[in-house]
Amino acid sequence: MATPTPLVITTPPVLQRNGRSLVFIVLIALNLRPAVTGVGPLLTEIRGDLGLSSTAAGTLTTLPVLCFGIFGLLAPLLRRGLREETLLVAAMGLLVIGLLVRIGPWQLTLFAGSLLAGLAISLGNVATPALIKRDHPQSVTLVTAVYSTALNLGASVSSGIMVPVEHAAGTDWRLPLGILAVPALVAGLAWIPRAGRAAAQPVVERPATAGLWRDRLAWQVTGFMGLQSFLAFVVFAWLPSLCQDRGLDKGAAGLVLALSCLVQALGSLAVPAIDRRLRDQRPLVVAVAVLTCAGFAAVAWAPIGLIWLSAVVLGLGQGCGFALALAFIGLRSTDAQVASRLSGMAQGVGYLIAATGPLGIGLLRDLSGGWTVPVCALMLVAVVEGLPGLAAGRDRTVGGGGRVKVMA
């Protein structure tokens, strides 16, 4: 009788070779969204305590996104002569300072801390894709998916624990927001040895990428990033309100948003599994546009009993879109320095576009008196998002060169 062949379960080669590196990337990613998403559940209390007007409260929620854009454009200039590890340690240190300043007793400290946190997150947003391109050039899509999944998990968990932590501690909004500094401190300390070793290595600076801002592919990547982010921040800001207007109570509406964010993590992980079977990313772009359109339509107009399924569809579309937008930065770059500059351009301009989303959709809702016009506008944006996405999905690199894709 033949001996049965034992079942062998293997992990992807990139995880076998660089598992420790991925852990450090995840540590950073988990800290790049809580400073933003943790404010929403406590915003009403913050307004009452510090006497913020509605306009000031709206500015508080939009300010970090504007920071992502403005500082994202400047971050590649800051990295000259510095390695990505050094920038990430600096980002975590600045994030700790910003989070602690933000819980001060005045409006000034609230906004100053938010600015510092926005600058810190912008550094992390730009440095991490460049690090992924440098250390994982053969597995950009897979490692980016792990990174974006950790971003989504950090956003979801932080928004979900703020109120429970406040109630459990019997305190005000400052403690739960201040606790966010702890994981940032842990991540910064964990990266210090790596930054020390990296500092001993020479930094080889190449000349600035000629004509990056005139490169059509760079603008296609930027357009996809911007429109994807536009839709994402609209969901963060308005999905609970839309659900409440459809008859859900405040708690259930918040859970719909939390479910959508969690499913985004699954959507991010689906990208490398599908992409390794494709010649390029254009089929994924089509899937993103279709799922996002269907998700918005279902959330707005499907029977209310299907709201949870609708949130899943929307989350899958947006999770795939986010992972794909980040992956384009590495896939369309020839090396880490080009990736850093493309990351600054795509995320800088992209987040400036995204900052108009919550305000613009809120204005449409007020002018139209309902959600039909805003949701139709969002579906139109999802379709338009596919145009630069289809162009960016072709297998090329910035500067016009072709490339051979190797997936781990």
Image (cartoon, grey):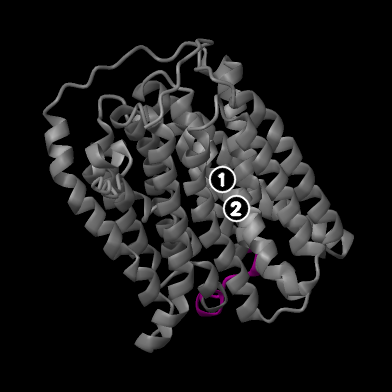
Locate the C terminus by quadrant.
top left
Secondary structure state at the residue bearing disc 1: helix
Amino acid carrying label 2: it is Leu
Amino acid carrying label 1: it is Cys
Examine the structure image and report whether residue 227 is included in the region drawn in magenta: no
State the image coordinates of residue 10 (x, y, percent, origin top left).
Answer: 30, 45
Label pair 2/1, CB-CB below 8 angstroms: yes
Magenta part of the chain: 46-55
Q: How many marks?
A: 2
- In the picture as drawn, the residue positioned furthest to the bottom comes out as 170
For image coordinates 54% across by 44% down, the residue present is 322
Q: Which mark is residue 127?
A: none
Q: Which mark is residue 316?
A: 2
Secondary structure state at the residue bearing disc 2: helix
For image coordinates 85% across by 64% down, the residue present is 370
For image coordinates 78% across by 56% down, the residue present is 297
Examine the structure image and report whether residue 48 is included in the region drawn in magenta: yes
Q: Is residue 295 above or below residue 217?
A: below
Q: Which residue is mark 1?
A: 320
Report, in whole angstroms, how far the alpha carbon at label 2 lies from the one at label 1: 6 Å
Q: Is residue 211 above or below residue 285?
A: above
169 relative position to 238: left or right: left
304 relative position to 323: left or right: right
Residue 247 appears in view:
yes
Q: In front here: 379 or 295?
A: 295
